[in-house]
Amino acid sequence: MTTIRPAQASDLQAISALDQRETGVAKPDYWREMLAPDRHFLVAETEQGSLAGFIAGEIRAWEFGQPAAGWVFAIQIDPELRLKSIGSALFDALVARFKAKGVTRVRTLVERKDHLILSFFRAQGMVAGPSLQLDMDLS
């Protein structure tokens, strides 16, 4: 059984380590910024108190005329604990926070080639949205 709770500064080392292990990039400052009061940053911990995973997002509104929506910025689950519904529990907890603030849409961005995360979000009921991401290489 896992416990879902708001992330705390004392969680940042474990969060950053899990993220770096999975992405290959250390970004402790990014995770520290996720603790801002306007963000929703949740962790799942095991019965033993170790980090099982995390999810981060915020409510954003009115970019390009779009009404308020909850945005999921990141989700990461310890690979050894995947397939135990921890990701779904974190997602549901974040969605509940968004709903409590009156939000009726949830959005995220995923790499087309990242089939694992794409499958996860589709399993949560997410589908292609009304917007199209545009991109430009600046190199």
Image (cartoon, rainbow, N blue to C red):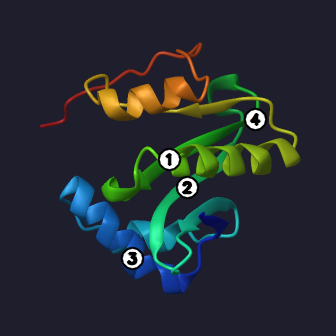
Position above or below: 102 against 46: above
Q: Quadrant of residue 37?
A: bottom right
In this rendering, the label closer to the viewer, 4 or 2: 2
What is the distance, in whole Å, between disc 3 and disc 1 at their CAs? 18 Å
Q: Is residue 65 left or right of residue 137?
A: right
Residue at disc 2, secondary structure: strand
In this rendering, the label closer to the viewer, 3 or 4: 3
Question: Which residue is disc 4 drawn over?
Answer: 68
**Residue for point 59% across, 31% down:** 107
Of the residues shown, which amino acid type is indicated by label 4?
Ala
Question: Which residue is disc 2 drawn over?
Answer: 56
**Residue for point 40% across, 56% down:** 81
Label 1 close to label 2 by CB (< 8 Å): yes
Of the residues shown, which amino acid type is indicated by label 1?
Phe
Question: Which residue is disc 1 drawn over?
Answer: 73
Question: Which residue is disc 3 drawn over?
Answer: 14
Label 1 close to label 4 by CB (< 8 Å): no
Mark 4 packing: few (<14 Cα in 10 Å), some, or many (20+)? Answer: some
- The dot on residue 94 is none
